[in-house]
Amino acid sequence: MNKRLLCIDAGSEYCPCYLAETGDCITCSILRGQDFCDCNWRGSCIYSEFVWNDYVKKNSRKFYSSKILKKESLGNEVYLLKIETTKTLARQLKQPGAYIFIRGEGLPQFFDVPMSIMQANEKEGYVYIVYKVLGTKTKRLNESDNILIRGPYWNGIYGLNNIKTLKNNNCLLIARGVAQAPTLLLINKIVKNNNITLILDKGKLEDNFILNYLSHKNIEIIFIDTMKYKEQEYIKEIMIDKKIDFVFSAGSDIFHKKIIELIDEIDPSINISATNNSEICCGEGVCGACSAHLENEGSVKGCKTQIDIRELIKRRVNID
C-alpha cells in the first residue's frame, strides 16, 4: 500500500491536526505507528511539530461571524453572495482550490455546507461564492442575512501540483454550470504566465456568470455545449491545434470522465487538474463522508488528500 500521500494541510498552521492524535496522519508514517520515517515530506517535520506541541494537535480553524454584503439571483435557484471576511482570511482564500464552510447564523453546526471561493479581495476583506439551492442546507442559507464561516480550506481542486508548476504552458480550461465559480481563482493565478483557452458551458444556468469577471483578461473564450458529441470533437481539435499541455476540468464526475476520455484520445501525457466533487462534511478528515477507496492507496480522505483525478474517476465512474 502506498503511504506517500500528500495532505493539503501539511506544514500549515493547522498541522498537526486531529489525525495526528488518532494515529491516522496522512503524511507522517511515524504518527501512523510505523517504526521508520517514510513521509517524503520536504517541509518541517510533522512528528517534531507534534512533539513540540506536547503531543496534541494545533489550533483548529475558527468560526467567523460575517455579513452578507450582497446577494444576487443568477436564475434557476442559483445565487451569488458577497461575504464580509477578515483581510487575513481573504488572503488565505485567494489560491485555486480554496473553499469555506458556511451556515446561517443561529443554526446548528450540522448545517455547515462547503462552498468554493470564486473571488477573494484581501484589501477590502470580502469573498464571492456562487451556489445552487438544492436541499435543506442551501434553502436555509438562502434565508440568512448573517452567516458563520469556517476556514480556510484548500483541497477544492485535485492536481494542484500540476497548477503550481504552470509557466509558459498552453492551458485549456473547461467549466460547466456552477463549477465556473472555482475556475476564476485558477484563471487569476495562471493568466500572466500562460496561454489560456476557456471553454464555457452554461449547463442548466441561464447564463455564463463568470463572464462579468473576465473582461480585462487576455484569454480566448469559447461557448459550447460540452455534452454534445459534435462539440466534444471540437474540443479535441482545440487540444491538437493549440498544442494543449494542461487541462482543467470543472464540473461533475461524469463531466470529468468525458474530459479524461477526450484527453486520452489525443495525448494521455497531458496534465490534468479537476474540481473536487467529494461529499465533504467536516473538512478535517474525521467524519469519513469524503472517503474514496483507491486501488493502491486504500481508503483516502478526499477533503485533505491530493488524489490523482484519473484514479479517482476510474473508481467512481468505471473508466476502462
Image (cartoon, grey):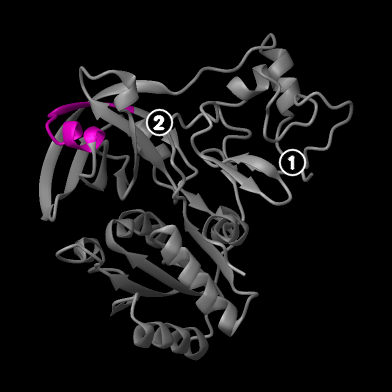
How would you rate the neighbour count of disc 2 (Cα within 10 Å): few for under 14, some for 14-19, many for 20 or more? many
Please state the horizontal and vertical placement of residue 95, each as a whole percent of the image. 44, 48
Give the number of the disc on residue 151: 2
Mark 1 touches mark 2? (CB < 8 Å): no
How many labels sit on residues?
Answer: 2
Residue 143 part of the magenta segment: yes
The answer to whether residue 131 is left or right of residue 10 is left
Give the number of the disc on residue 273: none
Q: Amino acid at mark 1?
A: Arg
Please state the horizontal and vertical placement of residue 150, each as a whole percent of the image. 37, 27
1 vs 2, front mark = 2
Q: Quadrant of the N terminus?
A: top right
The answer to whether residue 40 is left or right of residue 223 is right
Please name the residue shown 44% across and 51% down the image.
96
Q: Amino acid at mark 2?
A: Gly
Q: For the residues marked 1 and 2, what is the alpha-carbon distance in whole angstroms?
A: 25 Å
Please name the residue shown 76% across and 26% down the image.
32
Please name the residue shown 67% across and 34% down the image.
26
Q: Which residues are magenta?
A: 136-149
- Looking at the image, can residue 194 be seen? no
| Closer to us: 215 or 162 | 162
The image quarter in which residue 210 lies = bottom left
Placement of 309 over or under 52, stated as above or below: below
Question: According to the image, label 1 marks what residue?
Answer: 42
